[in-house]
Image (cartoon, rainbow, N blue to C red):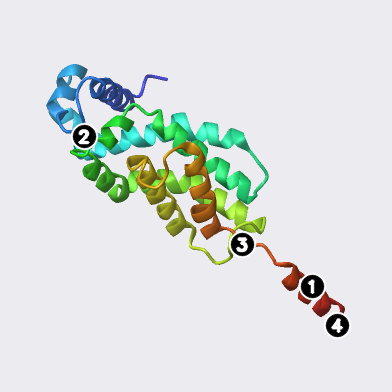
Amino acid sequence: MPPDEPSQTRAKILEVAASLLARFTVSKLTMEDVARAAGIARQTIYKHFSGKDDLLAELFVQQMEVNQYPVLRKLNDPPSPKALLRLFMTELNLARSYALFNEVLDPAVGPRMAELVFSSPKMAQARESFWVPLLEQYETAGVLRPGLDHRAVVRWITYQEFWLLTHPTVLCENDAELTDYIREFVIAALVREPASPTRLRRQARKAKA
């Protein structure tokens, strides 16, 4: 079977753009830079990406699908609040290692990155493709509060992670405090409230009646 030339060109554009971002910054990188380094016409890039933001979004998605989600899937813990906390913390740590992470922390770039993360359909689809099935599994297991809009939860989780990554010392001075914050506020907002002894005794009496 002959090689898929459009797919090869698209892959080359992404590879070149990722390498250029190690030398340039998000704000200074241009589509002309990418075209020149890839040895193609700038118009060719627009056959694959609508613009610079679309290209950057694809790089973020690629990072998640290649470097984050395979690691998270391997955790494979039985659904529980503790397992959900581990997933959240692991994803944060993996995001910190991404080549664009320091760019996101740049005050001159951070707001644009936030807009990109929350307005890109590609980003939303990639996040939902991983998290929605996981949340459904946790709800079936009785861990999550019933009736949650899972797509809305994914957006909320993404916001929480982005805010914590871009403001690492506002609420928490170290990873221990960060873990406590996520456990007590983020995870606690999603999981069922543990039944109190009084409620359990009341339920037992009703069951006997």
- In the rendering, which numbered label is found on residue 47? 2
- In the rendering, which numbered label is found on residue 209? 4
For label 1, the SS is helix
Q: Mark 1 to mark 4: distance in Å?
A: 12 Å
Q: Amino acid at mark 4?
A: Ala
Mark 3 sits on what residue?
A: 192
- In the rendering, which numbered label is found on residue 201? 1
For label 4, the SS is loop
For label 3, the SS is loop
Q: Amino acid at mark 3?
A: Arg
Q: Mark 3 to mark 2: distance in Å?
A: 47 Å
Q: Could you say where residue 96 lies in the image, as x and y percent from the top left?
A: 40, 32
Q: Is residue 17 above or below residue 132?
A: above
Quadrant of the drawing holding the N terminus: top left
Q: Nearer the viewer, mark 3 or mark 2?
A: 3
Q: Nearer the viewer, mark 3 or mark 1?
A: 1
Q: Amino acid at mark 1?
A: Arg
Nearer the N terminus, badge 3 or badge 2? Answer: 2
Nearer the N terminus, badge 1 or badge 4? Answer: 1
